[in-house]
């Protein structure tokens, strides 16, 4: 049994719809303004990236996070499965970036002797720790229908459960 968590299609559509008006305004200024166009091009490139990124997220049907009896796999962050034996603790943390938006994470406290599982390097882990997070974090802001506190509790319970209990937890867990 596996729990598969997918990206939110609604957030992908929202990204496209929020980027599109800015792209249209940038194109208008670019085509109708004879002054310096450097800022127009910069804005067009910046906001224009939201459209292909939103389309990619909209069409991507692969699971983002997979939780099974072996451990947790996040295809965007980790090279391999984070084994349950490596996880000491898990907790939910929210980083408020503005009044209207926040980034949500499941922070995994792992054994300090654990191998580096990130696709990135140690500097990124140190940066995460300087922000008050753990070295390994699961970004869950872009996932659909995920209760971060329930998911953190499941991960914490799975990390300390035996094999039969893990199977039972996977069968009975509801987000």
Image: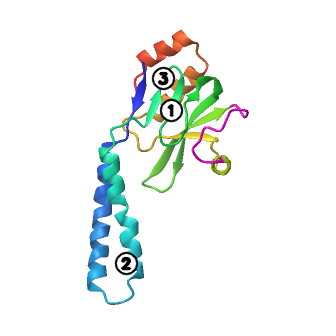
Q: Which mark is residue 73?
A: 1
Q: Position of residue 53 (x, y in %)?
A: 36, 54
How crowded is the residue under tag 3: few (<14 C-alpha within 10 Å), some, or many (20+)?
many
Secondary structure category for the residue under label 3:
loop
Q: CA distance from mark 2 to mark 3?
A: 48 Å
Q: CA distance from mark 2 to mark 1?
A: 41 Å
Marks 2, 1: nearer the viewer: 1
The image quadrant where one finds the N terminus is: top left
Return the disc, 1 or 3, that comes first in the chain's sequence: 3
Q: Which mark is residue 40?
A: 2
Q: Which residue reaches farthest top?
A: 164
Q: CA distance from mark 1 to mark 3?
A: 9 Å
Q: Position of residue 87 (x, y in %)?
A: 63, 28
Q: Could you tell me which residue is drawn at 33 percent across and 53 percent down?
A: 54
Q: Quadrant of residue 29?
A: bottom left
What secondary structure is the magenta-colored segment mainly? loop
Q: Could you tell me which residue is drawn at 64 percent across and 48 percent down?
A: 121
Q: Could you tell me which residue is drawn at 37 percent across and 41 percent down?
A: 7
Q: Is residue 45 magenta?
A: no
- Kindly indicate whether the residue at mark 1 contacts the one at mark 2 (C-beta within 8 angstroms): no
Which segment is the magenta one? 111-121
Any part of residue 11 in sight: no
Q: Position of residue 46 (x, y in %)?
A: 40, 67
Q: Is residue 147 above or below residue 69?
A: below
């Amino acid at each position: 049994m596996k729990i598969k968590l997918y990206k939110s299609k609604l957030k992908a559509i929202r990204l496209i719809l929020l980027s599109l008006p800015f792209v249209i305004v940038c194109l208008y200024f670019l085509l109708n303004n004879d002054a310096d166009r450097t800022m127009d091009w910069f804005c067009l490139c910046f906001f224009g990236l939201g459209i292909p990124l939103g389309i990619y997220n909209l069409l991507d049907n692969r699971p983002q996070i997979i939780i099974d009896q072996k451990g947790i796999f996040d295809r965007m962050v980790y090279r391999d499965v984070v084994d349950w034996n490596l996880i000491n603790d898990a907790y939910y943390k929210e980083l408020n970036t503005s009044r209207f938006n926040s980034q949500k994470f499941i922070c995994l406290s792992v054994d300090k002797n654990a191998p580096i599982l990130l696709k990135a390097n140690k500097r990124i882990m140190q940066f995460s720790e300087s922000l008050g997070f753990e070295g390994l974090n699961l970004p869950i802001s872009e996932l659909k229908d995920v209760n971060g506190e329930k998911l953190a509790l499941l991960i914490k319970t799975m990390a300390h459960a035996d094999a039969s209990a893990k199977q039972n937890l996977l069968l009975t867990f509801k987000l």
